[in-house]
Image: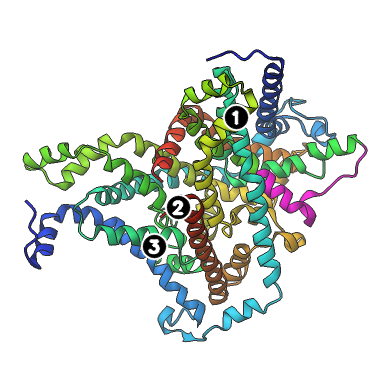
Amino acid sequence: MRSNKNKCSVLKKAKKQKYLLLLLLPGLIYYIIFRYVPMYGVLIAFKKYDFRFGIWGSQWVGLKYFQQFIFGPYFWRLIKNTFLLSFYDLIFGFPIPIIFALLLNEIKSKKFKSTVQTVSYLPHFISVVIVVGLLKTMLSPNGGVVNNIIEFFGGQEINFFMEKGWFRNLYVSSGIWQGFGWGSIIYLATMAGINPQLYEAAKMDGAGRFRCMWHVTLPGIKPTIVVLLILRLGRLLSVGFEKVILMYNPKIYETADIISTYVYRYGILKANYSFGTAVGLMNSLIALVLIIVTNKFSRKISDTSLW
Amino acid sequence: MIKDKSFGSKTFDVVNTILMIIILIITLYPLLYVLAISLSSTEYVQANLVTIIPKGFNLQAYHQVFADKYFWVAYKNTILYTVVGTVINLLLTSSFAFCLSRKDLIAKNTITILVIFTMFFSGGLIPNFLLVKNLGIYNSIWAIVLPGAINTYNMIITRTYMQGLPEEIFESVRIDGGNDLQIYSKIVLPLSKPVLATIGLFYAVGHWNAYFYPMIYMKDKVKYPLQVILKDMIVEQDFSGMEEMEALGQIPPTSDMLVGASIIVALIPILCVYPFVQKYFVKGVMIGSLKG
């Protein structure tokens, strides 16, 4: 049925596929308008954007806005905060779902196990606004439960949201609270797929519970761990700024302000569109390089890669 | 399985069970605490006597939240944005995924590469913001439902699922004179119910919980969804109608009580559907992860 004779074949094929192409059209238009037009819009990072002239008509300024950012007063602070926040999020947030899955896998009562699972996924479906609301209520300086406990033991009340030393702890720990259960699903599913004979063989050889975990379960989920780790590393620079915006305030910018929140404040709130775009573009470019590098690296050491 | 009844193994079980119970408590406690203070009376909350059981039960905080007219408008808006948004999401995602799942589609590889590229690089916040303004959809529901109409990750999950459908059924439709539109609507959509239910739920939760884009794309307070109103309450502690209560000579609820009550009211829909849809989410993660 295939006609691969001449150059007319593409047209012929298109005619044959006219309904399929009709179905493709809305999605294609979506990708062009909402994904590729903003990429074109990145040009304003190199221009002095003036809405009267549009993107193309505005005047070129070269790398002015990039220089302005790099030599600006906040450059190192923003780089440091962005990296540290995602780095802490990674080293504490990544292993906990694995440990949780390993321990949960050892629970024998099916009912208890599924109860714990169901409850632990729940926070994943709660919005960041509500998570921050819960955090603020629990940690409230006037009568929040945590400060009550601190005072009960004779400590000093802490105004957690106003102290720069607390921001990263709060960000990372609330992230763990929200994500550990959901993050464990994929490991639990992989564990369910491990051949039970392996466990019996290990027990025959005299392995106890911990050795079974160490020598059978952990190697069984290793490929999953590696793939998820690459994904995480690649996203090292894209911290969840939606939560930061809800949690920070000028008093703690020193530890809490990250590149994307800075873009939001200067770019959108103060309408410095070109400057904000330049900063955002640098962030995306570094992120893109990170993904490519980690992917190459992991293909070399573990044969698993994203593409 | 060989039963391991050594002392070490039993101790492990006991410790492990206790650990899991602690995890249950840590997960649920914040929610129960907020529920408790929202249901208590102001005196007890101010005296720091509420921990997990409401003291001096009263619904004052809820009365006040319900009296706020913006709260209800926002609730209605959220429902509207979620429903319209999810329908658009499902239509666009499924039709596009269907086309990409067909082996013989023209320029299939080029399109796929261009689509995957958007997962790794994007214009960023400001070009997107300017696009919404230039399109003239700023401050309207379209600014919320259109820019995220297709989530590439969900689209790929759907495409992978559709690729697994048997080709023979399509052929038989064609022999009966049916075209691709009919294959899509009469065969592929009904057969893809499990994956569509899953991504539909993902999309719906996303719309329900979204605050950032609605916050920057909506100007009028009457168009705000619930999360933006909640954000104003939680971050800016902005409660309208606080004065009315004081005028009535009552002790007004504390801001924590009001935040608590609003949180509970916003959570109720999620808590109601959660037990029923939970298993679909788990399935969705599995579909997505196997061939990621």
Q: Which residue is mark 3?
A: A34
Left or right of A3 on screen, residue B279? right
Let me know if marks 3 and 2 both belong to one chain: yes
Q: Main secondary structure of the magenta part?
A: helix
Q: Position of residue A282 (x, y in %)?
A: 55, 71
Expressed as whole percent of the image width and height from the top left, the position of residue A19 reads: 16, 52
Q: How many angstroms separate mark 3 from mark 2 (CA)? A: 28 Å
Q: Please state the total of marks drawn on the protein image.
A: 3
Q: Is residue B259 magenta?
A: no
Judging depth in this view, the residue of B95 and B23 nearest the camera is B23
Q: Is residue A194 visible?
A: yes
Mark 2 falls within which chain? A
- Tell which subunit mark 3 falls on: A
- Mark sitting earlier along the chain (3/2): 3
Helix, strand or loop status at disc 2: loop
Name which residue type carries label 2: Ser
In this picture, residue B182 sits left or right of residue A146: left
Marks 2 and 1 sit apart, C-alpha to C-alpha, by: 26 Å
Amino acid of disc 3: Phe
Residues tagged 3 and 2 counted as in contact (Cβ below 8 A): no
Asked if residue A33 lies left or right of residue A172, the reply is left
Q: Which residue is mark 2?
A: A305
